[in-house]
Amino acid sequence: MIARLTWVFAFVFMSTLHAEEPMSSTAFFRDLAETRSYSLGQPVSPKFTPDGKTVIFLRGGARDPVLRLFAFDIATQHERELITPAQLLGSAEEKLSPEEKSRRERARVSTRGFAAFQLSKDGTRLVVSLSGKLYLLTLADLKAVELPGQGWIDPRLSPDGKYLAAVADNELHVIDLEARTAKAITSGATSTLHHGVAEFVAQEEMDRREGYWWSPDSTHLAYQENDEAGVEVRYIADPLQPNAKPQTQFYPRAGTANTKVRLGVIARTGGTTQWIEWDREAYPYLARVVWDTLAAPLSILVQNRAQQKQLLLAADPAIGKTRVLLTETDAAWLDLDEVRMPVWLNSGKQFIWTTERNGAWQMELRNANGTFVRALTSVNFGYRRFVALDEKRQFVSVLGGTTPTDVHLWQVPLKGGTAKQLSTDRGIHSAVFSDDRTSYVHSFQLLNGSSGSEVISGPDKIALPSVAETPDSLPNVELTKATGAQTFDAAIIRPHKFVRGQKYPVIVSVYAGPTTKFVTSALRSYFIDQWTADQGYIVVRIDGRGTPGYDRAWERVVRGNLIDIALNDQIDGLKALAAQYPELDLARVGVSGWSFGGYFSAMATIRRPDIFRAGVAGAPVVTWENYDTHYTERYLGMPADAPEAYRVSNVTTYAKDLKQPLLIIHGLTDDNVYAQHSLQLVDALFMAGKAYEFMPMLGTHMVSDPIVRQSQQERIMAFFARALGPIP
């Protein structure tokens, strides 16, 4: 019903497009949308049982986004379904609380059913969550028992597997799995004081979604307390239900008050909290918490608000005192490794750390007091992500490589020396290791179009069962370099019926912002671009400066101005590609993007009408002072300190200059980039007397519903057909 009404609501604003919609490829796009670009049906979140003999994973159907739980016996290669949401819900529908919906939005999870599972340390039981309830499943007999309570979020088993912690009603609880009793171990929560949950910017911008951490011996928990009293509140109303109370969200926009976070340690049974001491005024961001081995201290990473200085602290949970292990500084900003750092060795005498201190990401070994031991990777290695530590064999598994478009799996000697590349085919690789590190699940998306997961144990490679559909055709992608004043990674996507010697209008498919590498060797990430190209266009992607994958200086150049270098680089790259590929018709160029890409598309269309003849801005950030603190201030500083940075990066600054067709799309219940942004742009354009097209949607920042995605994309193509035609 929502999808149908979304189409109707958009139609009011775009009624002139109906007759022009391209219909010849409707079935192809419907297939893409319903299969999530042929990813549904592939294994998700694989985990080894402690004995390494079985892999547990989630999987939906080829066109069914409801995830179910499976076990794969490696020796027999037998798969069995463990439990389905339908077994627990019966005929009832899955219901998500606003808190759970928000968490999934932050994690970009659009599937339903089991979002995750917890496996006990002995491998005999696991826990799943569904509709706010928790279920304990015994693997031997597949008997599921509902645990007490409801409204649970973020359940996690204790290391000994005897207890389960979870949050409900803003308090941290512990469930005794044998006694089947639940107890709140924190107290005092109010509408503005919350316990055990990560605040908005931690979930959205720091890649930290945990709000509590078990001690290694399962006797205590560290948890964060959020004081939201000073944080601005945003209200999100459902336009279809004007009688319903709007959802509220504490949203710290740039320059305003953040959540006040502190970290406490409490016994599993409850009692008095021991608060961990650090200068929270100077270092308000709790970026990472690590408590993995009894031989090592509780470790926390805290940042100052400017994100130009951070401290790695060792905390004594008994008395709350901390000591500094390591200090990092950067004149522009400090990026966070997406993996929790540090990684302590079991002895507690050394830890692994990652840093950009020397100009690019490196992994290094340090003593327990923080002193440097050795670099494990060079500045030229192209480190991307820590995967696993194998102390017995003395190596670290990491992702990286010198080709920015590819991500490979490597073994790096802990004692120093030459790294060994484990993956070979061009593409994006990742891995999950067994407890003893002798086996791993290798997941891959390759340049040749193949995609999947396999168990690698010694010389054996065993595919994890997939029920995903096989596409009839693959994207026609050429990875190349666009070389002008700078050299950029680029991708060219031609129509399947490309005619050599013919000129084609061009659509720049763009992100162009920090944190996201848009040109990669994962062929299947170009399916939507291929569908666009098959309408009679050539689609190009270009990664200019400010995007990840290169060194520190390449990214930091956008400090204080999020648009000028990004815009110039995209234009320089586009011209360089046109000089090399004469089929690109630079007299007919459109630009399209979402989120930061939507921001870029709006700016490009307005500021460079000589290049971009039409633009589609999806969910664009328009006024950066209305985006969140941790992201925005990292690049632009505080609004009061850098007003010019905010002015030049503000789309409305240039609204009076719009000359070319611009289509703006935004979900009215977006709780990341609020619809406020597009409405501010629409208002500025209206007041300047400029023509524009606006397509509001009934949805959030993600667009996952197949019918909605298809209708949206068809209207985008109808817009470009009018603006850039005639189409070959």
Image (cartoon, helix red, strand yellow):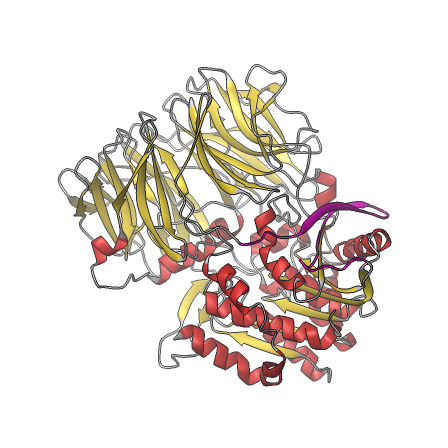
Q: Quadrant of the N terminus?
A: bottom left
Measuring from the top left, give residue 198's x and y in whole percent.
42, 49
Measuring from the top left, give residue 456's x and y in whole percent.
45, 27
Taking 610 as reference, is 537 left or right? left
| Along the line of sight, the residue nearer the viewer: 678 or 395 | 395
In this rendering, does residue 154 appear at all?
no
| Along the line of sight, the residue nearer the viewer: 161 or 381 | 381
Residue 81 figure quarter = top left
| Residue at 84% in and 52% down | 576
| Along the line of sight, the residue nearer the viewer: 499 or 532 | 499
Taking 328 as reference, is 604 left or right? right
Above or below, 40 against 536 in this view is: above
Q: Does the magenta stretch include residue 561?
A: no
Measuring from the top left, give residue 337's x and y in whole percent.
56, 38
Measuring from the top left, give residue 663's x and y in whole percent.
65, 74
| Residue at 47% in and 54% down | 108
Residue 253 figure quarter = bottom right
Q: In which quarter of the image is the C terminus?
A: bottom right
| Along the line of sight, the residue nearer the viewer: 279 or 454 | 454
Above or below, 142 against 159 in this view is: below
Farthest left residue in view = 179
Magenta segment boundaries in residue numbering: 472-500
Taking 727 as reference, is 223 left or right? left
Above or below, 543 against 602 in this view is: above
In this rendering, does residue 404 appear at all?
yes
| Residue at 31% in and 42% down | 70
